[in-house]
Amino acid sequence: MIVDLLNGANLAFIGDAYINLYIREYLLNKNITNSKNLHNLCVKYLSAKGHDKIVKNIRDELTEEEQNIFKRGRNFKYQSHRKNIDQTEYLNSSGFEAIIGYLYLKEEKDRLEYLLKRAILIIEEKNE
């Protein structure tokens, strides 16, 4: 399958898009419609810092295949580095996005739904 041939950046690219849509739909379904509030909330769920927090909490739940995909996304030699983001957080975020992209392309909907619901719970924990 073509998904197995994609590099970590390609998987993270599609994963980022899917996570964005999933979270935006989730927030709208919570009847949050104010644009400023939506943007501010999205940052919590979609930032490298948020993804890093998620990864640290789900690491032990990942299958061996998902851990390999995480490493493929995290270890890809990205050409740019954003200066305002911690490099470790950025790479962990890319690894998480790669997992989501991989699951999406493999059409593993149940696992995808489980991990994204877990991600939401982790971000919404009160003990930040």
Image (tube, rainbow, N blue to C red):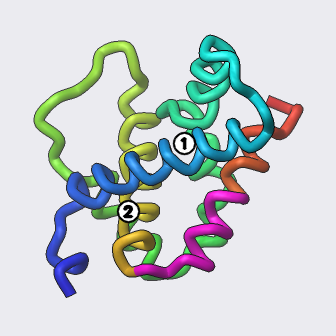
Q: Name the amino acid, label 1.
A: His
Q: Secondary structure at mark 2?
A: helix
Tell me: 17 left or right of 114.
left
Image quarter in which the C terminus is found: top right
Tell me: 3 left or right of 24.
left
Mark linked to residue 14: none
108 within the magenta span: yes
- Residue 33, x across and y down, in percent: 70, 24
Q: Which residue is painted at 58% across and 39% down in the image?
A: 24
Which residue of the protein is positioned furthest toward the bottom in this rendering?
1
Image quarter in which the N terminus is found: bottom left
Bin the neighbour count of mark 2 within 10 Å (Cα to Cα): few under 14, some 14-19, many 20 and up.
many
- Residue 64, x across and y down, in percent: 48, 81
From this view, report whether residue 16 is shown above or below residue 3: above
Q: Nearer the viewer, residue 29 or 95?
A: 29
Bin the neighbour count of mark 1 within 10 Å (Cα to Cα): few under 14, some 14-19, many 20 and up.
many
Answer with the quarter of the image where residue 69 lies: bottom left
Q: Nearer the viewer, mark 2 or mark 1?
A: 2
Q: Secondary structure at mark 1?
A: helix
From this view, report whether residue 69 is shown above or below residue 108: above
**What are the residue bounds of the magenta stretch?**
107-117
Answer with the quarter of the image where residue 79 lies: top left
Which residue of the protein is positioned furthest toward the right in this rendering?
126
* Total numbered labels: 2
In the picture of the structure, the residue carrying the numbered disc 1 is 51
Q: Nearer the viewer, residue 10 or 54?
A: 10
In the picture of the structure, the residue carrying the numbered disc 2 is 101
Mark 2–mark 1 Cα distance, whole angstroms, equals: 14 Å
- Residue 100, x across and y down, in percent: 45, 62
Q: Which residue is painted at 69% across and 37% down in the image?
A: 28
